[in-house]
Image (tube, helix red, strand yellow):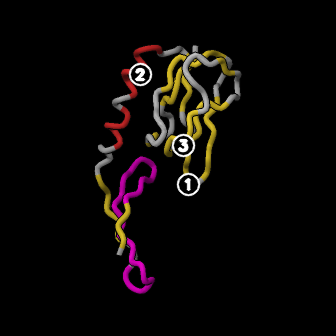
Amino acid sequence: MKNYTITVNGNVYDVTVEENGAGAAPAARPVAAAPAAPKAAPAAPKAAAGAGSIQVKAGAAGKVFKIEASVGQSVQAGDPVVIIEAMKMEIPVVAPEAGTVASIDVAVGDAVEAGAVLATLN
């Protein structure tokens, strides 16, 4: 048997899967979603330092795979700022309008929820 922790729509589950294929179905039990909160806390100091007025938000929950832009870089509407990995797909999060990157509020490997602010622009 193998144990996994998965997140579905913001709910965290511990799942046990039997490897041989014969036997009972996997058992899932809800776990408090509190572990996601500490990852969001480090973003606050970065945002306070140079937060811009235009927010770049995640369209889907996932993990930060790559950061495409850097603070001070000019971007046009539609330019990728951050790449999110969700369900083995790379999803670009693009600038909603032209501007200069004021802050990057996440790091590679961070888990993010849909709607989370990933960066800000001026």
Q: Which residue is mark 3?
A: 65
- Marks 2 and 3 sit apart, C-alpha to C-alpha, by 19 Å
Classify residue 99 as left or right of residue 13.
right
> Disc 2 vs disc 3: Cβ atoms closer than 8 Å?
no
**What secondary structure is marked by label 2?**
helix
Instruction: Sort mark 3 into few (<14), some (14-19) or many (20+) by Cα contacts within 10 Å.
Output: some
Query: Could you say where residue 120 lies in the image, as x and y percent from the top left?
Result: 53, 21
Instruction: Sort mark 1 into few (<14), some (14-19) or many (20+) by Cα contacts within 10 Å.
Output: few
What type is the residue that disc 3 sits on?
A: Phe
Q: Which residue is mark 1?
A: 87
What type is the residue that disc 2 sits on?
A: Lys
Magenta region includes residue 107: no
Place residue 110 in its image quadrant. Answer: top left
State the residue at coordinates (61%, 32%): 68
Q: Which residues are magenta?
A: 5-24
Query: Could you say where residue 24 lies in the image, as x and y percent from the top left?
Result: 37, 81
Q: Which residue is mark 2?
A: 46
**What secondary structure is marked by label 1?**
loop
